[in-house]
Structure formats: C-alpha cells, structure tokens
C-alpha cells in the first residue's frame, strides 16, 4: 500500500553519442622516487616528535605559571594601593 511506484525506465537514452576521431595520447606517468625507511630514520622521527612534544609542554607550563604569577601580583598590588 505504501510502496513507491518506480518508472520502468528512469534514465532516458542519450540524445546523441560522441565518437572521437583522434584518440587522445596516453598521459605520461612519472614515477616518484622511492623512499626507503630504515630503523634509524624511524627512531630519529620518533625522538624528534618526543622532543617537540616536550618543548610544547614546557612552553604551556611556563605560560600557565606566568599567568598565575601575574594574577597574584595584580591582587597584591591592588591590596597595597587600597591601604
């Protein structure tokens, strides 16, 4: 009862067909240079990633501590000016 009614031929046939007279030249495939991964390369990349992550964490901790110090100093100076 609730099933949709589909047409018998949903796509009409194309009005005209195109036949190329000259075949297109095949594209030239350039080969990429091969990349060799050995254990030293993987170890160097892992060590570099660990060092960069540690530096990022150090910068984040430094920024947070400077922000906390600024809030504390601001509070102390505000209390000092009120007296």
Image (cartoon, rainbow, N blue to C red):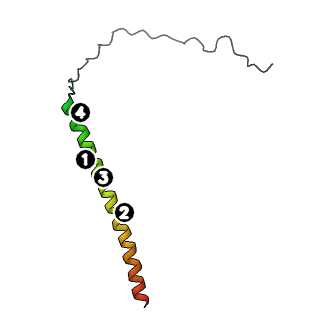
Residue at point 29%, 13% (across, down) = 26
Q: Nearer the viewer, residue 1 or 46?
A: 46
Q: Nearer the viewer, residue 6 or 11?
A: 6
**N-terminal of the two: label 1 or label 3?**
1
Within 10 Å of disc 4 (Cα), the crowding (few <14, some 14-19, many 20+) is few
The C terminus sits in image quarter: bottom left
Residue that badge 2 annotates:
64
Residue that badge 4 annotates:
42
Q: Nearer the viewer, residue 64 or 13?
A: 64
The N terminus sits in image quarter: top right
Label at residue 51: 1
**N-terminal of the two: label 4 or label 3?**
4
Mark 4: secondary structure: helix
**N-terminal of the two: label 3 or label 2?**
3
Q: Quadrant of residue 78?
A: bottom left
Q: Position of residue 22 (x, y in %)?
A: 33, 9
Q: Quadrant of residue 49?
A: top left
Q: Is residue 15 left or right of residue 1?
A: left
Within 10 Å of disc 1 (Cα), the crowding (few <14, some 14-19, many 20+) is few
The Cα–Cα distance between marks 3 and 2, rounded to whole angstroms, is: 12 Å
The Cα–Cα distance between marks 1 and 4, rounded to whole angstroms, is: 14 Å
The Cα–Cα distance between marks 1 and 3, rounded to whole angstroms, is: 9 Å
Mark 3: secondary structure: helix
Residue that badge 3 annotates:
56
């Amino acid at each position: 009862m609730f099933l949709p009614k589909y047409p018998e031929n949903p796509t009409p046939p194309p009005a005209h067909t195109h036949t190329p007279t000259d075949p297109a030249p095949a594209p030239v495939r350039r080969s990429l240079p091969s990349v060799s991964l050995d254990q030293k390369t993987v170890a160097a990349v892992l060590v570099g990633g660990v060092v960069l992550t540690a530096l990022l964490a150090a910068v984040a901790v430094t920024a947070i501590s400077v922000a906390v110090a600024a809030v504390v100093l601001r509070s102390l100076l505000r209390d000092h000016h009120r007296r």
